[in-house]
Amino acid sequence: MGDVLIMNEIDATANRLGIDLLQVDLDSIQLPPGEDFGIISDDEDVYEDDDQEVESGFGNIIVVDNLPVVPKEKFEKLEGVIRKIYSQIGVIKEDGLWMPVDPETQKSLGYCFIEYNTPQEAELAKEKTNGYKLDRAHIFAVNMFDDFNKFMKVPDEWAPPEHKPYTPGENLQKWLTDEKARDQFVIRSGTDTEVLWNDARHLKPEPVYKRSYWTESFVQWSPLGTYLATVHRQGAAVWGGANTFNRLMRYAHPQVKLIDFSPGEKYLVTYSSHEPSNPRDANRVVINIFDVRTGKVMRDFKGSADEFAVGGTGGVAGVSWPVFRWGGGKDKYFAKLGKNMISVYETESFTLIDKKSLKVENVMDFSWSPTDPIISLFVPELGGGNQPARVSLVQIPSKEELRQKNLFSVSDCKMYWQSSGDYLAVKVDRYTKTKKSTYTGFELFRIKERDIPIEVLELDNKNDKIIAFAWEPKGHRFAVIHGDSPRPDISFYSMRTAQHAGRVSKLTTLKGKQANALFWSPSGRFIVLAGLKGFNGQLEFYNVDELETMATAEHFMATDVEWDPTGRYVATAVTSVHEMENGFNIWSFNGKLLYRTLKDHFFQFLWRPRPPSFLTPEKEEEIAKNLKKYSKKYEAEDQDVSMQLSEQEREKRRSLKNEWEKKISEWKRLHEEEKMERQMLRDGEASDEEEEYEAKEVEVEEVLDVTEEVEE
Amino acid sequence: MRPILMKGHERPLTYLKYNKDGDLLFSCAKDHTPTVWFADNGERLGTYRGHNGAVWCCDVSRDSMTLITGSADQTAKLWNVETGAQLFTFNFDSPARSVDFAVGDKLAVITTDPFMELNSAIHVKRIAGDPADQSGESVLILKGPQGRINRAVWGPLNRTIISAGEDAIVRIWDTETGKLLKESDKETGHKKTITSLAKAADGSHFLTGSLDKSAKLWDARTLELIKTYVTERPVNAVTMSPLLDHVVLGGGQDASAVTTTDHRAGKFEAKFFDKILQEEIGGVKGHFGPINALAFNPDGKRYGFLLLQINVS
């Protein structure tokens, strides 16, 4: 539709301007729909967005075409009609309506100019009345006056588009081919942002790329690690490359505050919130979804902040980020919580599935299965308990309910998906009979089993508060911190054991731990039990297979714990929420401190994610079985490096010592040279008994006298 | 090593000084009375009464006969170490921050703080052999550095004066002409206020501690930067072992910045560094306030090698 209209307008304009459209190859002109026709050059350094309004002084003038051609007598009547239509939209300036007259025929030319007070009104008028049917024969074609200049610039002669030879892009995944199989991370401290290799063998990071003022607020890796995103006043940008970090694409979004990648990093969602012109209104929210590779806006959402702030169990006003949650695998769907509904969009067309949102009365929260197109949602109790709370699993796109569980006396629910989508744990807080306090239980869904069986788990002491819950990635186990804060307990459960395949069973409980956060290794099996904040950075490295502690350590005041994507190393960091001790430590998976780096004003530490492995589970198992064979090579390398390191270290020490010796002997020489002078300064007192390099037993009579007095 | 606790000051300590023989320890504090102690058992020997403000610094003559103190009461005083008698008072128009006897004890350098419209200054005074002949006249006055000059000491053979302070720059001045000979480089030098300065026993090199969380070792003749020791806390006090290649840094944040009750949060440890390798080799814990003053016994062999004092503020 839009395209056709524009063509009409151009037709009309061309006619009027005396351009023979037949000579112009219209197919060669590609006008992005809804775009202005100024072609933005790729290598412009400044985003052009803000310039649009001030480009020329005629932004508030529109041209209305396809008016009836009338003789002079009817001018007033027509003007009256037009004025009536257009003053509904905005304030037309005084003398702001002008209908030119053909000097020969004394008739109107079939078009007029209208000048509004503001460009916004003009823009709105164009949008609203373009295609307005005055009568059968007169369908308005409305354009911005400024656009005519652009139409005029269309060249008369068609020039064949330049043929650009194909240039292969850089290998954006090159960091994965590192010979030493190292991982990268990005840190941000002060004004610097730095990407480094974690060179655990050499016990220090190796710089990759560093830049000051790289981002204006934060950086973020894309979920597969291909891109590093930076955030600026004008929009977001992504960086990457084979050997360094080049800017790959920019996404214009003024005042962008938050960004989020789709899990397959095909799309980038950007968010900004703007102060309303009327202080009583809610903030205006703008959300854009970009195609990461082309930089095109696939869909934008605009509205008041209220529309985007519904739901969330906290019930706090404000947007819970990400607004859009991705699911269904391969970046297929994204969904947003709304009032009494969940809006699910699909990325093929960027429209709602079946053009309808999923209606769920009072829905509070939802979350996607990490792997399958299944949504779990939570609806709280209604009607003072007449209608129980419920948790449902809904299949997308069919919107069919797969499973539902009603829950009574519920105060709150939290849903935790296991990373391969095998299990869903729902933490249910229920009121006690008196309604004065709550207690907690778990509903465990086995998604991949027939009919999705649900099991109820209550802790040994069901009054225990739950402090943290975490599934083992790709595994069947989960860990819970429960109990009272100073020394809570930590329990491990498994969804299947050798004895009980289909039942959850407790593995162990660790009593009285100083921990309040759980960090599973991404490959499972190991977990860091961390006491952050109030616990001052206590760390316990725990092996869940053997149910034994590998190491306990402390990173004083640590605020963040992050496993590297391979599960070989753990980074702990003290970020600038504390004034002191800022920096990060790198640990081996079993809790050995490898190195530490101090950085003032430390803001972020992020491991570069890795894409999932292409190996089949069978192959992985085979490798795990024959690990000895594979690891030999690396062990040898490790040893070489460590030998080399200690050799280097010795060499360094030797040279430092030599240098120092040289200095000392030079000083000694000078000291000796100055001896006579010094002696003179001291009235001839032999100055050699003064402090010397070698410690001498200095005997001064006076001193001994003093000592004797003490002994008396 | 068993620590000796010396109790006697009512306000935070500001400075410590051993006499040359290492048997006496002089301590200055924000209370008004410098105190002398027996270094080997911590017994208080006496106090020097007469100042009317915090005492910032002191030095003792080579023969342990004369003590010089600089105080916030805008005076520097000479004392008879043995009797505690005041020998002479140098009057200034602003607080005296640091004092140092020259080789031969015939000259002393005294720095004064900026005060009202007054700029900071370095004064050189002649010290008379007989207190009766003592004059208050300055032989030389050096001006120029911005802000407080926290320390000024004599260079080799009294030919130079080395100064350091709030402007983070170390300067070497010619004592003959009063000219500025050398300045530390802004790039490689300290980035924040230099709080302390300690000379090596032979005066060939010196160590500076700064709020930029580092200490630096310099050649006293050439002002060549030799070593840098990086720590996690602002450095308030520094000293070097006369025997071993160790340097000790003391620090912690300002009392006003102590927000947590955990003693570790303040990092009140004294940190030992290898002087040559610039690596941290250890720490001494057990202080409940930032360390403001540190001094090594010149002959540390006999009774440990270090005495720490703390600032409970």
Image (tube, rainbow, N blue to C red):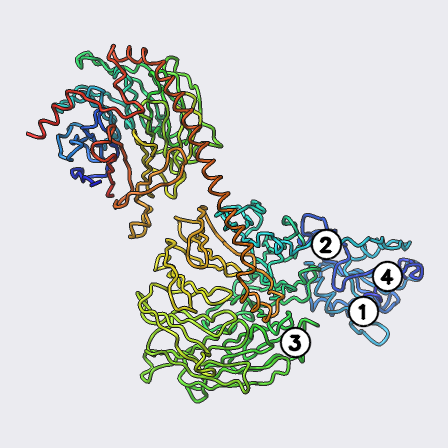
- Is label 1 or label 2 in front? 2
Q: What residue type is labelled 3?
A: Leu
Determine the secondary structure under disc 1.
loop
With A331 as the anchor, is A139 left or right in this view? right
What residue would you read off at disc 4?
A: A13
Tag shown at residue A352: 3
Tag shown at residue A140: 1
How far separated are the C-alphas under marks 4 and 3? Answer: 37 Å
- Is label 4 or label 3 in front? 3
Tag shown at residue A169: 2
- Is label 1 or label 4 in front? 4
Determine the secondary structure under disc 4.
helix
Q: What residue type is labelled 1?
A: Phe
Label 4: few (<14), some or many (≥20) within 10 Å?
some
Q: Are marks 2 and 3 on the same chain?
A: yes
Q: Which amino acid does label 2 sit on?
A: Gly
Residue B13 in the image: x percent, y percent? 24, 36
Sequence-wise, the earlier of marks 1 and 2 is: 1
Residue B261 in the image: x percent, y percent? 28, 52
Sequence-wise, the earlier of marks 2 and 3 is: 2
Q: Name the chain under label 3.
A: A
Quadrant (top left, top right, bottom left, bottom right) of the C terminus of chain A: top left
How far separated are the C-alphas under marks 2 and 3? Answer: 34 Å
How far separated are the C-alphas under marks 1 and 2? Answer: 47 Å
